[in-house]
Image (tube, grey):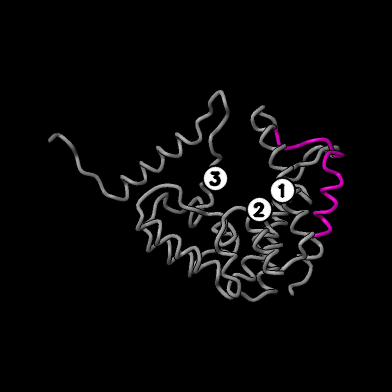
Amino acid sequence: EGTVPIDTGLFFSRLGQRIIHILTTRTFSGVLYEIDMRLRPSGDSGVLVSNIDAFSDYQINKAWTWEHQAIIRARIIAGDPYIAEHFTKIRKMVIAKDRQPSILLSEVKDMRQRMRKENAGKEQDKFDIKHDPGGIIDIEFMVQYIILLNAHTNPGLLKWTDNVRQLDEISMAGIIPEQDAITLKKAYLAYRSRLHRLNLRGKSACVDIDEFKDIRSEIIKIWARIMTTPP
């Protein structure tokens, strides 16, 4: 009594906004999660919340390659079991799509170049752990490219959403040399550890240019081997 019914879409949009507000509120310990709503279907012009069937149609028929890269990292953390099961099926179907190698490589590299341009302009004596060549995003892009290229014949690549276990699966499948996988994992963990400490202190992701110099060089070499020509 006294309540006014609202449209289901409006209700869930408001709920989504509330959840985003809670997760991104700055506290004495920092921000719980960094949420980039540009990654939702259709980006800034898209609705905040869509039903599962609309999400499936978008991912299968309309999504860009970079959006398929993003869904590799996606996982259900809470919610209705039916939606969770349905989402997991969509995720696996999208990732396991058979792709044309040269087109996939071109699209992944083009997006990586765009990101580098958007984040250019830092001090020359600094290394941006996330965005610079040899950094975190290079590792993530290599893993995502390998998975999108090979998941249709290697179901084990669909299992995990974190880079470390994904690299384990890639190595066990024989897609890249074991030593390359070890190097990428060690670098990723070292970068993440340093980045977390910087975040807790409210600092940027930029460190002295000589920090991680050897690690960075190894990642750049692996990038050149993996991202030059498709197998």
Quick one: label 1, few (<14), some, or many (20+) residues within 10 Å?
many
Q: Which residue is drawn at 53% across and 52% down?
A: 39
Against 202, residue 113 (above or below) is below
Q: In front: 186, or 86? A: 186
Q: In front: 40, or 176? A: 176
Q: What residue type is labelled 1?
A: Tyr
Q: In front: 36, or 79? A: 79
Q: Does 187 lie within the magenta span?
A: no
Q: Name the residue under label 2.
A: 164
Label of residue 36 in the image: 3
Question: Which mark is nearer the camera, 3 or 2?
Answer: 2
**The N terminus lies in quadrant:** top left
Quick one: label 2, few (<14), some, or many (20+) residues within 10 Å?
some
Q: Residue 61, percent across and down?
A: 48, 70
Q: Residue at x 53, y 26 (%)?
A: 27
| First-in-chain label (3 vs 1) | 3
Q: Distance between the residues labelled 3 and 2?
A: 23 Å
Q: What residue type is labelled 3?
A: Asp
Question: Which SS class for mark 2?
Answer: helix
Magenta residues, start to end: 204-222
Q: Residue 116, percent across and down?
A: 73, 51
| First-in-chain label (2 vs 1) | 2
Q: In this view, does 28 lie to the left or right of 81?
A: right
Question: Which mark is nearer the camera, 3 or 1?
Answer: 1
